[in-house]
Amino acid sequence: MTTRQPKAVALLSGGLDSLLAARLVQEQGVYVEGITFFTGFCTDGLHHISGVYKGNVPKRNNAMWAAEQLGVKHHIINIVDEYKQIVINPPHGYGAHLNPCLDCKIFMVGKALEWIEAHGFDFIVTGEVIGQRPMSQRRDTMPVIAKQSGAHDRLLRPLSAKLLPPTLPEREGWVDREKLLDISGRSRKVQMALAERFGFRDYAQPAGGCCVLTDENYTRKLQDMWQHRGSKDYEFDDVMLLAVGRHLRPNERMKLIVSREQSETEYLQGYRKRFGHIKTVSHAGPITLVEGEHLTEDDWLLAARITARFSKGRNAPRVTVRVAGPGEEGRLMEVTPLPPEEVPQDWYI
Ligand code: SF4
């Protein structure tokens, strides 16, 4: 009699924990495929277009990299639209910023459950560790995820399994509970040693969360956007734009997004049809997207002077800029760059 090889899907966030969790079950002879949910807020994607996140970190999709390390088939599933309800109105509330981690996990595990049922897989693997994250990875909230997602005992967390009740794959003997782990807490020592044992190097360093909803700077801009629109809604473009450029609100009518480097300038140029925009002409400099209604000539002049202030002509007496409404060719304007001391800190969102 031949026994069928058990099949699991691993939720790959791109971090080390989910990579190790997947490897631990793979090591026990389970067939594994990876799933990554694309919410729009995923740190990897947004860092690629933003100028802030430079340095030595390789620009790569860490979840794809993890799947490659595991040698597994990888599915990236777009949940941008469905995920909105979680961000806008999370039943379990937000974490330290606008991160709805508990509802996010419930939602993702629920989606993974739909997936395994549709594809004839047996169980779900995540890299969750008891006590590692304040909201979704606590001893009391981990059972909530298993229950409310509907996955119940088809959800296996190999890194903390020995500290949790046995799950279906353990009871069925698809995996040996004794070979699973009992990690808890925030220290990453055990994971790092395990990574060494499995030969995983160059893995993504934990950055406090797998998405920018845990990022104070990002969520401040999201809050500001909601407040000024008078509604907690967003489009995918909003999510992207909040990650790019300096955001300034010099008055209640007008918000500016000023690019910080060439890649951002190129990216923001793609929005010239939707937004008013200003570009320096006489000197190298940024592009500024101008958002607002009923803007006065003084507003445009101020926006032009701010744009000039961030250009190579910041110390020149006059800088020529092109000022245009959405989709327009625009007109040339010669302005005096605004001195830095006249750009107060509270303009920055
Ligand atoms: S950090 Fe973001 S993606 Fe990760 S669980 Fe929290 S809300 Fe979800």
Image (cartoon, helix red, strand yellow):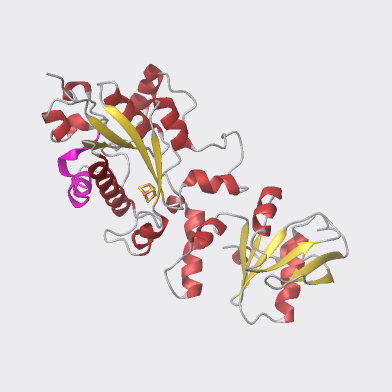
Q: Nearer the viewer, residue 81 or 91?
A: 81
Residue 335 position in % (x across, y down): 83, 69
> Does 214 appear above or below 70?
below
The quarter in which the N terminus is drawn is top left
Q: Is residue 155 magenta?
A: yes
Q: Is residue 63 left or right of residue 307?
A: left
Can the viewer see residue 235 in this picture? yes
In the rendered image, which quarter contains the C terminus?
Answer: bottom right
Q: Residue at x 72, y 63 (%)?
A: 341
Decide which of 6, 226 is in the foreground and name it.
6
Does 53 lie within the magenta span? no
Who's the residue at 65% across and 59% down the image?
Answer: 270
Q: How many marks?
A: 0
Nearest the camera: 78 or 141? 78
In the shown orientation, is residue 14 left or right of residue 10?
right
Q: Which residues are magenta?
A: 140-157
Determine the residue positioned at 53% across, 49% down. 46
How far across and down, in percent of the image, does residue 65 sit? Answer: 47, 32
